Amino acid sequence: MKRRTLLAASLAAPWHPAAAQAQQRVAWVSVFPLQQVKEYLAAFRTGLAAQGFAEGRNLVLDAVSADGDPRQLPAVVDAVVRRRPAVIVSQGGAIFEVRRVTDIPVVFGFSGDPVKAGLTDSLARPSRNLTGVTFMAVDLNGKRIELLREVSPMARDVMLMGDPVHPGVELEVEASQATAERLGLRLRWAPTRTVHDVRDQLASVLRDPVDGLVVLPDSVMLQSRADVSAFAARHLLPSISGWSSFARAGGLLTYGPHLESSFARLAYHAARILQGTPPSQLPVERPTRFELVANLRAAAAIGRTLPLSIIARADEVIE
């Protein structure tokens, strides 16, 4: 899609100067196509409504996407800035382009460590004009290994896949490795900087087989969730990740933050800023609600029966 076409398609609400005087403008910026993040955008809208901000009454929400092409982000962000929103909300990897905007408050939803990523100097007292929610919960990594072992008690070799430059990834690998060693598993770390790396690492399993796949919740793996799920089904491998969208794409299990709740908290931050609170007075939040999602169709596809103990604990069961 050409840049001019992209920008026209990405901006959801038309520009009405008269209406803008009575309504506050919020921009949502994502590198992913809006269709891929529609659940999170819906949760954000619901969260805004709960805070008293409704589109068409006192709010204009511009939903903006680079349509999956990071090279389009600079032009998309420039278009957003020209509209002078009161708040920019950035989701995923788009934050690294949005953070160059220093004169508009920015609220981020980020799956990594915001301090290591250079988004803030402190979670408790955010620096500059950025605050938001981190979806990273390092202690859940060990739990995912335990769940995989519960599904596959005879497993001995497991592949851990994830973006090696994702801020905080070394903590996730360390936590996963510690649990694997305690359970007597050999954990193979498979760095996946790009979607092509994901495919290469999956191909390596054909040469050096493993008994299961653990997928870190980062943007590269999110883009690859369909490929990973299809590979796992084809080769009868149990798999687990941290985001429910992985299970809904055909993965066996997910355990991690309840992302819809987290995106509703982004709305809380945005609403506070619209009401006059500076970002520096809004601490960066960690997840407080988590969910276990089990996919029975995926279990059947790999010839497994999920333990009743997992099904009973699951917040969602895909049948």
Image (cartoon, helix red, strand yellow):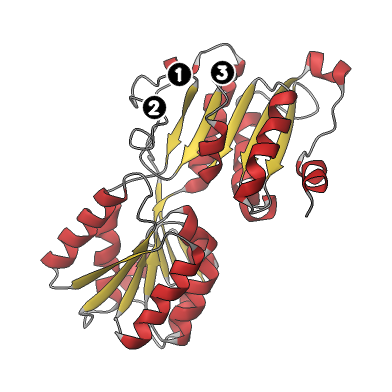
First in sequence: mark 2 vs mark 1 = 2
Q: Where is mark 3, residue-wise?
A: 273
CB atoms of marks 2 and 1 within 8 Å: yes
Q: Distance between the residues labelled 1 and 3?
A: 14 Å
Mark 3: which secondary structure?
helix
Q: Could you tell me which residue is drawn at 34 percent across and 68 percent down?
A: 310
Mark 1: which secondary structure?
loop
- Residue 163 is situated, as x and y percent measured from the top left of the image, at 39, 57
Which numbered disc covers residue 143? none
First in sequence: mark 2 vs mark 3 = 2
Which numbered disc covers residue 128? 1
The N terminus lies in quadrant: bottom right
Name which residue type carries label 3.
Ile
On the question of residue 297 being in view, the answer is no
- Residue 261 is situated, as x and y percent measured from the top left of the image, at 50, 42
CB atoms of marks 2 and 3 within 8 Å: no
Foreground residue, 74 or 256?
74
Q: Could you tell me which residue is drawn at 33 percent across and 22 percent down?
A: 124
